[in-house]
Amino acid sequence: MAKFNGVIGYVEMKKTAPGVFQEEVTERIYKGDFVKTATKWRDGENLNSDLVIDNRLSVVADPFAYSKFPMIRYVVWMGAKWKVTSAEIQRPRLILTIGGVYNEQTSGTSSDS
């Protein structure tokens, strides 16, 4: 069983102004084990096929992870952010299933000064 020591990203919507919400990302480091590792290529509308992983990751959770587990969006593994497709509580662990590459949301407006 492969070991995991890396970052899990939580995304929460925060109100920044009346009627305006923005994503707030929190990253935390966790340790755990991969309980399943598999990859596949998915043909789609793109010219090239997409790499999709179907890995299950078991991480030792803390109180923050238990309280925020619905907000888990990605896992950083092998230098890329992979989206979490499901999260399950099995105390004292969280079981995360990760799939395709995570595409971060970017706002349509720029606040550069």
Image (cartoon, grey):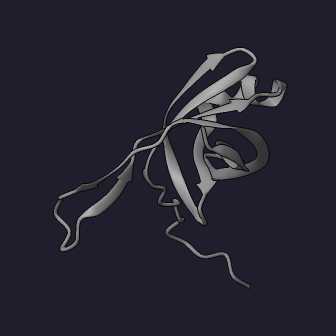
Furthest residue to the right? Answer: 63
Q: Which residue does the image show at 18% across and 74% down from the upper left?
A: 47
Position of residue 13 in the picture relative to residue 31 (left or right): left
Looking at the picture, how far across and down is residue 20, in whole percent? 61, 50
Position of residue 57 in the picture relative to residue 86 (left or right): right
Looking at the picture, tell me which residue is in the foreground, 72 or 19: 72
Looking at the picture, tell me which residue is in the foreground, 72 or 79: 79
**The N terminus appears in which quarter of the rendering?**
top right
Position of residue 51 in the picture relative to residue 20 (left or right): left
Indicate the quadrant where residue 54 lies: top left
Furthest residue to the front? Answer: 1
Looking at the picture, how far across and down is residue 68, in whole percent? 70, 29
Is residue 29 visible in the rendered image? The answer is yes
Is residue 15 visible in the rendered image? The answer is no
Would you place residue 74 above or below residue 41 in this image? above
Q: Which residue does the image show at 61% across and 38% down from the upper left?
A: 72
Q: Which residue does the image show at 70% across and 52% down from the upper left?
A: 25
Indicate the quadrant where residue 77 lies: bottom right
Position of residue 80 in the picture relative to residue 47 (left or right): right
